[in-house]
Image: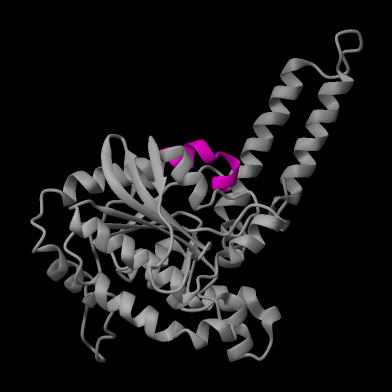
Amino acid sequence: MDTLPHERQIKDYEKMISQLKKQSSAKHTLWSESELHRLEKKLQVLKKKVYSELSPWERVTISRHPQRPHSSDYIKNMCEDFHELFGDRAFGDDHAVIGGLATIQGEKVVIIGQEKGNDTESRLYRNFGMVHPEGFRKALRLMKLAEKFKLPVVSLIDTPGAYPGLSAEERGQGLVIAQNLYEMYQIETPIIVVVIGEGCSGGALAMAIGDVVGMLEHAYYSVISPEGCASILWKDAQKNAEAATTLKLNSENLIDLNIVDTIIKEPLGGAHHDPQFTYSEVQKFIFEELKRLKTLSSDMLPELRYCKFRKIGKVAPKHGDKIDNARTYKNSSSK
């Protein structure tokens, strides 16, 4: 497993304990069980300390970890069955978007996800999760299909941004993103959005207009990547850590700004440390929201969705005025 910079001290400690256990064989007991147990307790304390003091940039690196679960992993582990659908009926099939009909805990849904790939070959095939215009049209086509058959939509967000190449611009990348934003507000079926990794720029937002937006604890959601922001503001991409802090892109910042509704708990250190726990938490969030949204009439959903996004952000008070930004929200990490 790839070691992130902030995890090196932990990995060194784990390696030391492993070596000490090997040295303490049945014939040569150099370290007693109580001493090894004490060292393991210190390791747990170290982990909690390191992971409780993560900077915004360090959490961005967690969201990009090579072993972090991707959309295809969630679909495989959350859905009892999945029938993939292809193409946008206009140009072709974008491999950066995976979607189709599925069942989650007995509930029939249309699930759509942005897929990055897991190795060199699959990353090239998936274009590193950077969606082309046909990918956004494919996602919208599946949402319209869900609306026709009265099925809820689950949208998994994980992209560094829409593909910025010439071929995408030639096929109307900006227009397609704008059309998705416009159309998703009007779809008369529940839409549940989960930011599972990177949620960057219009490439994320074009598939993230939903009735409820959940976000994994160490995912990030931003108008631009930290590197892109640093390049624009300071003409220096190396100031990515400063940019990550300035952008307020972590889950607790976005809860406070009404951009996301729920923080979904991750295992200590990130989803890649215990993927099964993460799948379970995301599945629980989706199922609970499905039950709630099914109680609302389909014609109410577009208006409520529109109002939800109109409330995003805060208004700075005039000098001397007071403003109460407190908001009640469901936070699974507090359970």
Residue furthest top as drawn = 27
**Quadrant housing the N terminus:** top right
Number of marks present in the image shown: 0
Q: Position of residue 137 (x, y in %)?
A: 38, 71
- Which colouring convention does the figure follow? one colour
Query: Residue 79 versus residue 236: which sits nearer the camera?
Result: 79
Q: Which residue is at 60% across, 60% downward?
A: 64
Q: Relative to 294, is 211 above or below?
A: below
Q: Which residue is at 39% across, 45% downward?
A: 83
Q: Is residue 276 left or right of residue 3?
A: left
Q: Quadrant of residue 221?
A: bottom left
Q: Relative to 243, is 10 above or below?
A: above
Q: Position of residue 207 (x, y in %)?
A: 37, 67
Q: Which residue is at 89% across, 21% downward?
A: 23
Q: Is residue 78 left or right of residue 61?
A: left
Q: Quadrant of residue 38?
A: top right
Q: Is residue 304 left or right of residue 145?
A: left
- Is 32 inside the magenta-drawn segment? no
- Is 277 inside the magenta-drawn segment? yes
Q: Is residue 301 visible?
A: yes
Majority SS type along the magenta span: helix
Q: Relative to 250, is 36 above or below?
A: above
Q: Position of residue 325 (x, y in %)?
A: 25, 71
Magenta span: 270-280
Q: Is residue 208 visible?
A: no
Q: Which residue is at 25% across, 86% downward?
A: 317
**Quadrant housing the C terminus:** top left
Q: Is residue 227 left or right of residue 106?
A: right
Query: Residue 100 versus residue 119: which sits nearer the camera?
Result: 100
Q: Position of residue 136 (x, y in %)?
A: 41, 71
Query: Residue 317 versus residue 175: which sits nearer the camera?
Result: 175
Query: Residue 58 versus residue 153: which sits nearer the camera?
Result: 153
